[in-house]
Image (tube, rainbow, N blue to C red):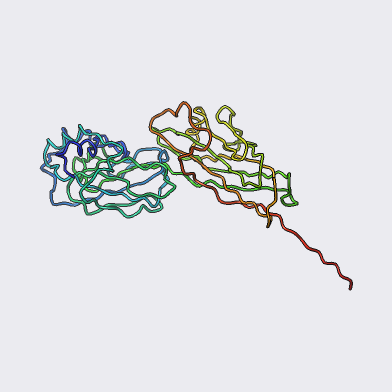
Amino acid sequence: MSTHTQSARRRASAVVGALALGIAGLAGASAAFADQGNIDPNATGSIVIHKHEAGSQKADGTADGQTDTQGGAGVAGVTFTAFPISNLDLKTQADWNNLRNWNIPADACGTAFDAGKVSSPTNGQGLTTIGNLPVKAYLVCETNAPSTVKKKAAPFLVTIPFPNNAANTAHADGNWLYNVNVYPKNTVVVAPTKGVEVSKNGIKTADQVTFPVTAKIPSIAATDSFKHFVVSDPLDSNLEEGKVASVKIKGQAVDPSYYVATGGQNPSVGFTKAGLAYRRTVPNETIEVVFTAKVKTVPAGGVIENVANLYIDVIPGPTPPDNPPTTPPPSEPPTPTNKVVTSRGDTTINKTDA
Protein backbone atom coordinates (compact mmCIF):
# COMPACT_ATOMS: atom_id res chain seq x y z
CA MET A 1 0.00 0.00 0.00
CA SER A 2 1.62 3.27 -1.06
CA THR A 3 1.63 6.15 1.41
CA HIS A 4 2.28 8.79 -1.28
CA THR A 5 -1.38 9.08 -2.35
CA GLN A 6 -3.37 11.55 -0.26
CA SER A 7 -6.62 9.59 -0.40
CA ALA A 8 -4.88 6.37 0.55
CA ARG A 9 -3.07 8.17 3.34
CA ARG A 10 -6.32 9.56 4.71
CA ARG A 11 -8.13 6.23 4.56
CA ALA A 12 -5.33 3.84 5.50
CA SER A 13 -3.26 5.99 7.81
CA ALA A 14 -2.40 4.58 11.21
CA VAL A 15 -2.71 5.94 14.73
CA VAL A 16 0.43 5.90 16.83
CA GLY A 17 -1.56 5.40 20.03
CA ALA A 18 -3.02 2.18 18.54
CA LEU A 19 -5.98 2.12 20.90
CA ALA A 20 -7.55 -0.87 19.17
CA LEU A 21 -4.56 -2.99 20.11
CA GLY A 22 -5.02 -2.53 23.83
CA ILE A 23 -1.33 -1.62 24.07
CA ALA A 24 0.43 1.67 24.55
CA GLY A 25 1.38 2.02 20.88
CA LEU A 26 4.26 3.93 19.34
CA ALA A 27 3.89 7.21 21.21
CA GLY A 28 7.31 7.08 22.79
CA ALA A 29 9.06 5.44 19.89
CA SER A 30 9.82 8.20 17.43
CA ALA A 31 12.04 10.49 19.48
CA ALA A 32 13.52 8.58 22.38
CA PHE A 33 14.00 5.01 21.24
CA ALA A 34 17.04 3.04 20.19
CA ASP A 35 18.91 3.93 17.01
CA GLN A 36 16.83 2.89 14.01
CA GLY A 37 20.06 1.54 12.56
CA ASN A 38 19.80 -1.29 15.07
CA ILE A 39 16.84 -2.73 13.16
CA ASP A 40 17.76 -5.88 11.26
CA PRO A 41 16.32 -5.25 7.77
CA ASN A 42 16.55 -8.94 6.88
CA ALA A 43 14.67 -10.19 9.94
CA THR A 44 11.14 -11.53 9.91
CA GLY A 45 8.63 -11.23 12.70
CA SER A 46 5.05 -12.02 13.60
CA ILE A 47 1.84 -10.49 14.91
CA VAL A 48 0.44 -12.57 17.78
CA ILE A 49 -3.28 -11.83 18.06
CA HIS A 50 -5.19 -12.27 21.33
CA LYS A 51 -8.88 -12.01 20.40
CA HIS A 52 -11.11 -11.41 23.43
CA GLU A 53 -14.63 -10.19 24.08
CA ALA A 54 -14.77 -6.45 24.64
CA GLY A 55 -14.66 -5.55 28.32
CA SER A 56 -13.70 -9.06 29.43
CA GLN A 57 -10.07 -8.22 30.28
CA LYS A 58 -9.40 -6.60 33.62
CA ALA A 59 -6.02 -5.26 32.47
CA ASP A 60 -4.57 -4.30 29.10
CA GLY A 61 -2.07 -6.58 27.45
CA THR A 62 1.33 -5.36 26.31
CA ALA A 63 3.27 -5.89 23.10
CA ASP A 64 5.70 -8.36 24.67
CA GLY A 65 2.82 -10.61 25.77
CA GLN A 66 4.14 -10.73 29.35
CA THR A 67 1.38 -8.79 31.11
CA ASP A 68 -1.38 -10.66 32.91
CA THR A 69 -4.66 -9.46 31.40
CA GLN A 70 -6.51 -11.02 34.36
CA GLY A 71 -8.93 -12.89 32.17
CA GLY A 72 -10.40 -12.26 28.79
CA ALA A 73 -13.02 -14.46 27.12
CA GLY A 74 -11.56 -15.79 23.88
CA VAL A 75 -13.42 -15.36 20.58
CA ALA A 76 -12.95 -18.28 18.20
CA GLY A 77 -13.20 -18.37 14.41
CA VAL A 78 -11.97 -14.84 13.62
CA THR A 79 -9.42 -14.17 10.86
CA PHE A 80 -7.21 -11.13 10.31
CA THR A 81 -5.24 -9.80 7.34
CA ALA A 82 -2.00 -7.79 7.64
CA PHE A 83 -1.60 -5.37 4.74
CA PRO A 84 1.97 -4.04 4.25
CA ILE A 85 2.51 -0.29 3.94
CA SER A 86 5.16 -0.63 1.29
CA ASN A 87 7.15 2.61 1.14
CA LEU A 88 7.77 3.41 4.80
CA ASP A 89 11.39 2.98 5.82
CA LEU A 90 11.42 1.99 9.48
CA LYS A 91 15.15 2.63 9.67
CA THR A 92 14.62 6.38 9.32
CA GLN A 93 13.61 8.77 12.08
CA ALA A 94 11.50 10.80 9.66
CA ASP A 95 9.14 7.94 8.88
CA TRP A 96 8.72 7.08 12.56
CA ASN A 97 7.88 10.75 13.15
CA ASN A 98 5.35 10.68 10.29
CA LEU A 99 3.48 7.84 11.96
CA ARG A 100 2.76 10.07 14.96
CA ASN A 101 0.56 12.36 12.85
CA TRP A 102 -1.65 9.71 11.26
CA ASN A 103 -5.02 8.47 12.38
CA ILE A 104 -6.94 5.47 11.14
CA PRO A 105 -10.59 5.69 10.06
CA ALA A 106 -12.99 2.92 10.93
CA ASP A 107 -13.56 2.14 7.24
CA ALA A 108 -9.86 1.97 6.32
CA CYS A 109 -10.17 -1.74 5.53
CA GLY A 110 -12.42 -0.93 2.59
CA THR A 111 -9.47 0.66 0.77
CA ALA A 112 -7.64 -1.21 -1.99
CA PHE A 113 -4.35 -2.63 -0.73
CA ASP A 114 -1.36 -4.55 -1.86
CA ALA A 115 -1.77 -8.27 -1.20
CA GLY A 116 -2.07 -8.97 2.53
CA LYS A 117 -1.24 -12.02 4.62
CA VAL A 118 -4.21 -13.81 6.20
CA SER A 119 -4.16 -15.48 9.60
CA SER A 120 -5.68 -18.83 10.43
CA PRO A 121 -8.94 -18.54 12.44
CA THR A 122 -8.51 -17.84 16.15
CA ASN A 123 -8.73 -20.89 18.39
CA GLY A 124 -10.96 -21.38 21.44
CA GLN A 125 -8.71 -19.10 23.50
CA GLY A 126 -8.90 -16.39 20.84
CA LEU A 127 -5.29 -16.89 19.68
CA THR A 128 -3.82 -16.79 16.19
CA THR A 129 -0.55 -15.63 14.62
CA ILE A 130 0.40 -14.00 11.33
CA GLY A 131 4.02 -15.11 10.87
CA ASN A 132 6.98 -14.64 8.53
CA LEU A 133 6.42 -10.91 8.18
CA PRO A 134 9.26 -8.78 6.77
CA VAL A 135 10.30 -5.54 8.45
CA LYS A 136 7.49 -3.12 7.57
CA ALA A 137 4.49 -1.27 8.95
CA TYR A 138 1.21 -3.19 8.58
CA LEU A 139 -2.43 -2.21 8.64
CA VAL A 140 -4.26 -5.10 10.32
CA CYS A 141 -7.94 -5.69 9.53
CA GLU A 142 -10.44 -8.15 10.93
CA THR A 143 -11.55 -9.75 7.67
CA ASN A 144 -13.86 -12.56 8.75
CA ALA A 145 -15.80 -13.39 11.91
CA PRO A 146 -18.63 -15.72 12.99
CA SER A 147 -22.21 -14.47 13.11
CA THR A 148 -22.01 -14.13 16.91
CA VAL A 149 -19.63 -11.17 16.49
CA LYS A 150 -21.82 -8.09 16.51
CA LYS A 151 -19.06 -5.50 16.33
CA LYS A 152 -15.73 -6.21 14.69
CA ALA A 153 -12.46 -4.78 15.95
CA ALA A 154 -11.35 -1.49 14.45
CA PRO A 155 -8.39 -1.62 12.02
CA PHE A 156 -5.03 -0.88 13.60
CA LEU A 157 -1.32 -0.39 12.84
CA VAL A 158 1.51 -2.70 13.83
CA THR A 159 5.18 -2.26 13.00
CA ILE A 160 7.68 -5.08 12.67
CA PRO A 161 9.78 -4.51 14.72
CA PHE A 162 8.08 -2.75 17.63
CA PRO A 163 9.81 -0.64 20.31
CA ASN A 164 10.43 -2.56 23.53
CA ASN A 165 10.36 0.48 25.79
CA ALA A 166 8.62 1.28 29.06
CA ALA A 167 5.65 2.86 27.27
CA ASN A 168 4.85 -0.31 25.35
CA THR A 169 5.92 -3.40 27.27
CA ALA A 170 6.00 -4.96 30.72
CA HIS A 171 9.72 -5.77 30.63
CA ALA A 172 11.42 -3.05 28.63
CA ASP A 173 15.00 -3.77 27.58
CA GLY A 174 15.67 -1.03 25.00
CA ASN A 175 15.73 -3.46 22.09
CA TRP A 176 13.25 -4.21 19.32
CA LEU A 177 10.41 -6.74 19.43
CA TYR A 178 10.01 -8.75 16.24
CA ASN A 179 7.09 -10.80 17.60
CA VAL A 180 4.41 -8.31 18.59
CA ASN A 181 1.35 -9.17 20.70
CA VAL A 182 -1.90 -7.30 20.00
CA TYR A 183 -5.31 -7.39 21.70
CA PRO A 184 -8.20 -6.32 19.41
CA LYS A 185 -11.66 -6.64 20.95
CA ASN A 186 -15.09 -7.83 19.76
CA THR A 187 -18.64 -7.46 20.96
CA VAL A 188 -20.07 -10.99 20.88
CA VAL A 189 -23.76 -11.88 20.98
CA VAL A 190 -24.72 -15.36 22.19
CA ALA A 191 -27.95 -16.77 20.76
CA PRO A 192 -30.79 -16.52 23.29
CA THR A 193 -32.79 -19.56 24.42
CA LYS A 194 -36.52 -20.07 24.68
CA GLY A 195 -38.73 -22.39 26.70
CA VAL A 196 -42.45 -23.11 26.77
CA GLU A 197 -44.93 -24.00 29.50
CA VAL A 198 -48.46 -25.28 28.85
CA SER A 199 -51.23 -26.77 30.96
CA LYS A 200 -51.08 -30.44 31.87
CA ASN A 201 -53.95 -31.14 29.50
CA GLY A 202 -52.05 -29.90 26.43
CA ILE A 203 -53.09 -26.90 24.41
CA LYS A 204 -56.74 -26.00 24.14
CA THR A 205 -58.52 -22.92 22.88
CA ALA A 206 -58.33 -20.04 25.43
CA ASP A 207 -55.54 -21.73 27.40
CA GLN A 208 -52.57 -19.55 28.29
CA VAL A 209 -49.09 -20.49 27.08
CA THR A 210 -45.95 -19.08 28.73
CA PHE A 211 -42.68 -18.47 26.85
CA PRO A 212 -39.60 -17.64 28.99
CA VAL A 213 -36.76 -16.19 26.89
CA THR A 214 -33.24 -15.88 28.33
CA ALA A 215 -30.27 -14.04 26.85
CA LYS A 216 -26.72 -13.21 27.91
CA ILE A 217 -25.94 -9.51 28.17
CA PRO A 218 -22.79 -9.06 26.05
CA SER A 219 -19.68 -7.40 27.41
CA ILE A 220 -18.86 -4.23 25.47
CA ALA A 221 -15.84 -1.95 25.42
CA ALA A 222 -15.57 0.88 27.93
CA THR A 223 -15.55 3.31 24.99
CA ASP A 224 -18.83 1.95 23.56
CA SER A 225 -22.52 2.02 24.48
CA PHE A 226 -25.54 -0.07 23.58
CA LYS A 227 -27.42 1.43 20.64
CA HIS A 228 -30.48 -0.70 21.34
CA PHE A 229 -31.47 -3.94 23.07
CA VAL A 230 -34.82 -5.49 22.13
CA VAL A 231 -36.31 -8.93 22.81
CA SER A 232 -39.41 -9.85 20.81
CA ASP A 233 -41.66 -12.89 20.49
CA PRO A 234 -43.62 -12.85 17.21
CA LEU A 235 -46.63 -15.11 17.73
CA ASP A 236 -47.95 -17.82 15.47
CA SER A 237 -51.33 -16.98 13.95
CA ASN A 238 -52.87 -19.62 16.21
CA LEU A 239 -51.91 -17.53 19.26
CA GLU A 240 -53.19 -14.14 20.38
CA GLU A 241 -53.09 -11.55 23.18
CA GLY A 242 -49.32 -11.60 23.59
CA LYS A 243 -48.12 -9.90 26.77
CA VAL A 244 -44.92 -9.34 28.77
CA ALA A 245 -45.31 -11.01 32.15
CA SER A 246 -41.93 -10.14 33.69
CA VAL A 247 -38.41 -8.85 33.00
CA LYS A 248 -35.58 -9.97 35.28
CA ILE A 249 -31.79 -9.63 35.41
CA LYS A 250 -29.86 -11.82 37.84
CA GLY A 251 -33.23 -13.14 39.00
CA GLN A 252 -34.39 -9.70 40.15
CA ALA A 253 -37.17 -7.64 38.60
CA VAL A 254 -35.85 -4.82 36.40
CA ASP A 255 -36.91 -1.25 37.14
CA PRO A 256 -39.91 -0.62 34.81
CA SER A 257 -38.46 2.77 33.87
CA TYR A 258 -35.61 0.93 32.15
CA TYR A 259 -37.76 -0.63 29.44
CA VAL A 260 -40.92 -0.36 27.34
CA ALA A 261 -43.15 -3.45 27.03
CA THR A 262 -45.56 -3.89 24.12
CA GLY A 263 -48.23 -6.55 23.53
CA GLY A 264 -50.20 -7.98 20.63
CA GLN A 265 -49.03 -10.36 17.91
CA ASN A 266 -45.40 -9.27 18.30
CA PRO A 267 -44.91 -8.57 22.01
CA SER A 268 -41.53 -7.11 22.87
CA VAL A 269 -39.32 -5.52 25.48
CA GLY A 270 -37.05 -2.65 24.45
CA PHE A 271 -34.70 -0.78 26.76
CA THR A 272 -34.71 2.98 27.24
CA LYS A 273 -31.62 5.19 27.39
CA ALA A 274 -31.42 4.67 31.16
CA GLY A 275 -31.93 0.95 30.69
CA LEU A 276 -29.14 0.72 28.11
CA ALA A 277 -26.80 2.58 30.46
CA TYR A 278 -27.71 0.11 33.22
CA ARG A 279 -27.10 -2.89 30.98
CA ARG A 280 -23.47 -2.06 30.42
CA THR A 281 -22.94 -2.30 34.20
CA VAL A 282 -24.03 -5.97 34.26
CA PRO A 283 -21.95 -7.64 31.50
CA ASN A 284 -22.35 -11.39 31.02
CA GLU A 285 -25.38 -11.52 33.30
CA THR A 286 -28.61 -13.23 32.17
CA ILE A 287 -31.79 -11.40 31.31
CA GLU A 288 -35.08 -13.31 31.33
CA VAL A 289 -38.18 -11.99 29.60
CA VAL A 290 -41.36 -14.02 30.11
CA PHE A 291 -44.02 -13.68 27.42
CA THR A 292 -47.56 -15.06 27.62
CA ALA A 293 -50.20 -15.69 24.98
CA LYS A 294 -53.57 -17.39 24.61
CA VAL A 295 -54.37 -20.18 22.20
CA LYS A 296 -56.69 -18.81 19.54
CA THR A 297 -57.09 -21.93 17.44
CA VAL A 298 -55.60 -25.41 17.39
CA PRO A 299 -54.32 -26.23 13.90
CA ALA A 300 -54.69 -29.56 12.14
CA GLY A 301 -52.11 -31.85 13.65
CA GLY A 302 -52.19 -29.87 16.90
CA VAL A 303 -48.70 -28.33 16.55
CA ILE A 304 -47.85 -24.63 17.14
CA GLU A 305 -44.25 -23.51 16.63
CA ASN A 306 -42.65 -20.38 18.03
CA VAL A 307 -39.28 -18.55 17.86
CA ALA A 308 -38.24 -15.39 19.73
CA ASN A 309 -35.71 -12.80 18.50
CA LEU A 310 -32.95 -10.68 20.01
CA TYR A 311 -31.82 -7.35 18.54
CA ILE A 312 -28.56 -5.80 19.81
CA ASP A 313 -26.29 -3.14 18.44
CA VAL A 314 -23.52 -0.95 19.87
CA ILE A 315 -22.14 2.48 19.03
CA PRO A 316 -18.92 4.29 19.92
CA GLY A 317 -19.09 6.72 22.80
CA PRO A 318 -20.01 6.60 26.50
CA THR A 319 -23.67 7.63 26.10
CA PRO A 320 -26.59 5.62 24.63
CA PRO A 321 -28.99 7.32 22.19
CA ASP A 322 -31.64 9.57 23.70
CA ASN A 323 -34.47 7.69 21.98
CA PRO A 324 -33.38 4.13 21.18
CA PRO A 325 -35.89 1.86 19.40
CA THR A 326 -37.96 -0.15 21.88
CA THR A 327 -39.56 -2.41 19.27
CA PRO A 328 -37.73 -4.57 16.68
CA PRO A 329 -35.65 -2.39 14.31
CA PRO A 330 -37.07 -3.14 10.84
CA SER A 331 -33.73 -3.09 9.00
CA GLU A 332 -31.73 -5.29 11.40
CA PRO A 333 -31.58 -9.08 11.11
CA PRO A 334 -32.29 -10.66 14.51
CA THR A 335 -30.47 -13.29 16.50
CA PRO A 336 -33.15 -15.99 16.89
CA THR A 337 -33.75 -18.44 19.71
CA ASN A 338 -34.29 -22.13 19.34
CA LYS A 339 -37.72 -23.22 18.10
CA VAL A 340 -40.26 -24.39 20.70
CA VAL A 341 -43.33 -26.47 19.93
CA THR A 342 -46.67 -26.80 21.70
CA SER A 343 -48.88 -29.65 20.58
CA ARG A 344 -52.08 -31.52 21.27
CA GLY A 345 -52.51 -35.20 20.54
CA ASP A 346 -55.73 -37.24 20.22
CA THR A 347 -56.26 -40.60 21.86
CA THR A 348 -58.64 -43.23 20.46
CA ILE A 349 -59.96 -45.85 22.91
CA ASN A 350 -61.43 -49.08 21.56
CA LYS A 351 -63.37 -51.11 24.17
CA THR A 352 -64.13 -54.73 23.40
CA ASP A 353 -65.43 -57.62 25.46
CA ALA A 354 -63.26 -60.54 26.55
Residue found at the very far right of the displayed protein: 353
Total numbered labels placed on residues in the image: 0
With 318 as the anchor, is 11 left or right in this view?
Answer: left
Image quadrant where residue 24 sits: top left
- The picture places residue 167, in percent across and down from the top left corner, at 25, 35
Q: Quadrant of the C terminus?
A: bottom right
With 20 as the anchor, is 336 left or right in this view?
Answer: right
Q: Nearer the viewer, residue 200 or 237?
A: 237
Residue at figure coordinates x 24%, y 34% from the top left: 103
Residue found at the very far bottom of the displayed protein: 354
Residue at figure coordinates x 64%, y 48% from the top left: 196
- The picture places residue 174, in percent across and down from the top left corner, at 19, 40
With 228 as the anchor, is 352 left or right in this view?
Answer: right
Image quadrant where residue 155 sits: top left
Q: Quadrant of the N terminus?
A: top left
Q: Is residue 123 above or below residue 325?
A: below
- The picture places residue 274, in percent across and down from the top left corner, at 51, 27
Q: Is residue 219 above or below residue 307?
A: above
With 64 as the anchor, is 55 left or right in this view?
Answer: right
- The picture places residue 286, in percent across and down from the top left corner, at 54, 41
